[in-house]
Amino acid sequence: MFQVSVVIPVYNVGQFLEEAVGSALIQPEVGEVILVEDGSTDNSNEICQKLCADFEKVRLLTHPGGENQGVCKSRNLGIREARFDFVAFLDADDWYLPNRFGKENILFENPDIMAVYSLSAIRFPDGREELFGCKDNLIEMLGTNDLGGVYCHIMRHDIILGHTNANTFRKEVFEKVGFFDERLNLHQDTELWNRIARNFLFWPGELNKPVSVARRHSQNRITSKSKSSQLKLLFVWIDNIGLSNMYPCEKDNFIYLYSRAISNPINSDFLRKVIFHTFLRLCEIFKDRFIRNFYQSNKVNNLR
């Protein structure tokens, strides 16, 4: 029987928490909901305790001393403590839709399938929604389930496989690939999805409609996205892969993302495009040297 452990990091989300947990508990495939209380200063901890008392499937974990350790450590703690063979995530200010695990229930009957991506939606304060994630069945589109071919397509087209709330994994994936990198305060899901996609084929789940909704509001961590956070992502990604192990398609993706990180803060559309294409061309000419210098200089700074 397919049962999943849903990991929910909790930090100052008291107003949203019951809706998030309720949306997970109504899924018949959910075997447990793991709340990782991350040192909240609002009433989140009290709500977590009430949910544990009210629902047998809800478990509450905390960090030593009840300290705030951040979303990565909270998700990683939840993964390690998960009691079931499949793991999914839900941000505490978001919610699952009723069809969240319908496709996974079928797909994971195949023991060779390790990871599944589905569509999510982003809900903006004005009520507007946008789909988020890869809308294409990559295996069908490419006509192959060759891991290397699919992965390099993802790299060369900078494909975001899915929102944190919309992907499902066998727990053993994390035992083999590793966990969320705790050096990252932002983009940690993107970095981990790339590491997983490098080692395991992501199979398409529900691509016709979203399986979850992410709520945009002023407290979202993604609002802190910056050039610095994007460049740190690139460094951590290379550090985890190993500089000498990078594939040509990964180098292409790095050059694209680096050029975009440098040019994105520029307000003028015209100037931003000029800077982007200038960096892109220069970096392509000296690709290997540039990537090596970028990594080594950041490695020194990181060790300080």
Image: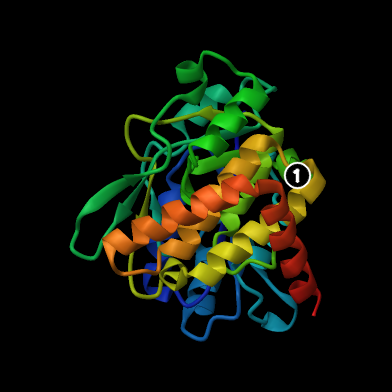
Q: Position of residue 133 (x, y in %)?
A: 42, 42
Residue at 45% in and 41% down: 27
Residue 175 in view:
yes
Q: Quadrant for the N terminus, please.
A: top right
Q: Is residue 191 left or right of residue 24?
A: right
Residue at 62% in and 72% down: 70
Q: Position of residue 161 (x, y in %)?
A: 50, 40
Nearer to us in this view, 260 or 33: 260
209 to 141, vertically: above or below? below
Q: Is residue 79 left or right of residue 100?
A: right
Residue at 71% in and 35% down: 199
Nearer to us in this view, 215 or 99: 215
Residue 33 in view:
no
Q: Quadrant for the C terminus, please.
A: bottom right
Q: Residue 230 is drawn in which quadrant?
A: bottom right
Residue at 55% in and 59% down: 187
How dense is the environment of label 1, judged by Cα within 10 Å: few (below 14), some, or many (20 and up)?
A: some
| Residue holding disc 1 | 177
